[in-house]
Image: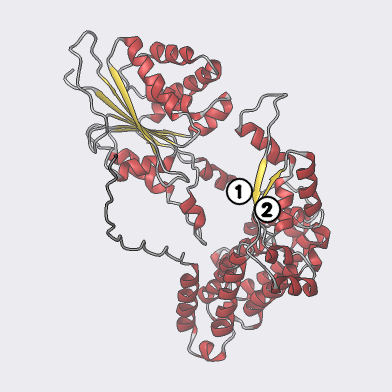
Amino acid sequence: MTRPITILVAALGGEGGGVLADWLIEAALHEGFPAQKTSIPGVSQRTGATTYYVEIYPEKGARPPVMALVPSPGGIDLMAASELVEAGRAMQNAFITAGRTTLVASTHRIYATSEKMLPTDGRYDAQKILEAAPKVAQKAVLFDMSRLAQEAGTVINAVLFGAMAGSGALPLSREACEAAIRGAGKGAEASLRGFAAGYAEAAGPASVGAAYPPRSAAANIAANTPLPHTHPQSDRIRREFPLPLHALLDEAVARLADYQDPAYAALYLDRMRGVLAVDREAGGEAGGWQLAQETARLLALWMSYEDVIRVADLKTRASRFARVRREAAAKDGQIVVVTDYLKPSASEIADILPPAWAARLRKNAGAGRAVKLRTSDVSGFLAMRLMAALKPLRRRSSRFLEEQALIERWLGALKRLGFAALDAELALEIVHCARLVRGYGETWRKSRAAFVKILDELVENEQAVAKGADALKLAIRSARNAALVYEEAKPAPAVKAKPVIWMKQG
């Protein structure tokens, strides 16, 4: 062969990308092939991937080759990615070509900070990557490697290594790859299990050029399946609401009963019964009860708003500590220390106080003070549980009363003003405005102000309504989208020239 095999691996921090590169080198040396590796550190918080570049010259006893230190677009034989968006990033950077590259990637998602920061659903469209992969690459091997890694009790790098070997793109035998894993020593047995699982999945006929759907797709299918009757409101849901709403209402009732109490979940159904009547009057059955379904989803999210009580409750649940131990791969008997970094502001504390007390505290509300709390210790855990124990008093809190009043105002706009009967799309635009009210602290105050402004100036404004449904619909949509747009960062200041001062000795 006249050139080396070029391999580019993109991985996230803590996924063992460096170990995977070491395995590749050891396996190549085991086969007697010259090989070298380089790496480029990524940027924190998923703004850049950590990449490992490996070149293997698959010829024994040949003249020592000259190898490159960095990958070049269009010059990659095997592209491996431990997460789906990293595969998309490689496509965008032209490292994957139809005439040369085999793409091996996991279809699971780990959301980047840029996706989480947006006030709307900022997730990248994973389906576009899944559809593009078989077209852009010569061969695409895509499946959920995170699930296989969990089942094998190992890190995803072992499964990814097995998939690379099973794809047929590596000039390395399975025996050489397994020998490289054994040579690493620590955790070899678990890594070998993960390698075998990845190898079997990639070598199977279904994986050749196939795009596997991500796990979230399966979760969405499961979410549309009616849940068993496991809560007191199940019979009421099936008696008072049409079948297309059952699964959604079951999920919402379970969420709200866990968030507050069964009476709060019953209040949710009372509200939804009024929305269903509006949808029925507007002929919503023919459209699959779209107005009721969208209202049910947004109302459940709104009624389970996040406050410090909710945060404390979630952070001290046994399921959370079990998940942390599982992610840390802690063995039985090992101590895992969990430290939570918090910065509650005075306004967030005021939210859980009665209105009179909250008003006094908000006058002197500051930016908040950073708190580092070990929730795995007795003192830190008890402090969190004490905060979570305030849940029965939430109904008397200032924010609870404010949220309920605004919810009734929102629903009242649909019921009293008859927007659903006037124009179904207009009613949906009003319903979608509830997406603005989210978060807590300063985020909640800003989003709530934008929502109230739309109600004041458009939905409940007689002059705006008099302009007609089409004009009102367009105005509401424009105002809502403008409020949802993430405020762009300010541009960096211009670079100013500075004199260079040379220091001489003596």
Q: Type of residue at label 1? A: Ala
The quarter of the rendered structure image containing the C terminus is top left
Q: Name the residue under label 1.
A: 223
- Earlier along the polypeptide chain: callout 2 or callout 1? 1
Residue 259's spot in the image, x, y percent?
74, 55
Q: Type of residue at label 2? A: Glu
Let me know if residue 253 appears in the view: no
Identify the residue at the far top of this view.
61
Q: Tell me where residue 288 sits by quadrant.
A: bottom right
Q: Name the residue under label 2.
A: 251
- Where 179 sits versus 161, above or below? above
Which label belongs to residue 370?
none
Q: Contact, CB < 8 Å: mark 2 with mark 1?
A: yes
Residue 193's spot in the image, x, y percent?
53, 19
- Where 281 sits versus 237, above or below? below
Which residue corresponds to the image point at 27% horizontal and 42% vertical from the top-left?
Answer: 504
Circle 1: element type:
helix
Which residue corresponds to the image point at 29% horizontal and 41% vertical from the top-left?
Answer: 135
Circle 2: element type:
helix
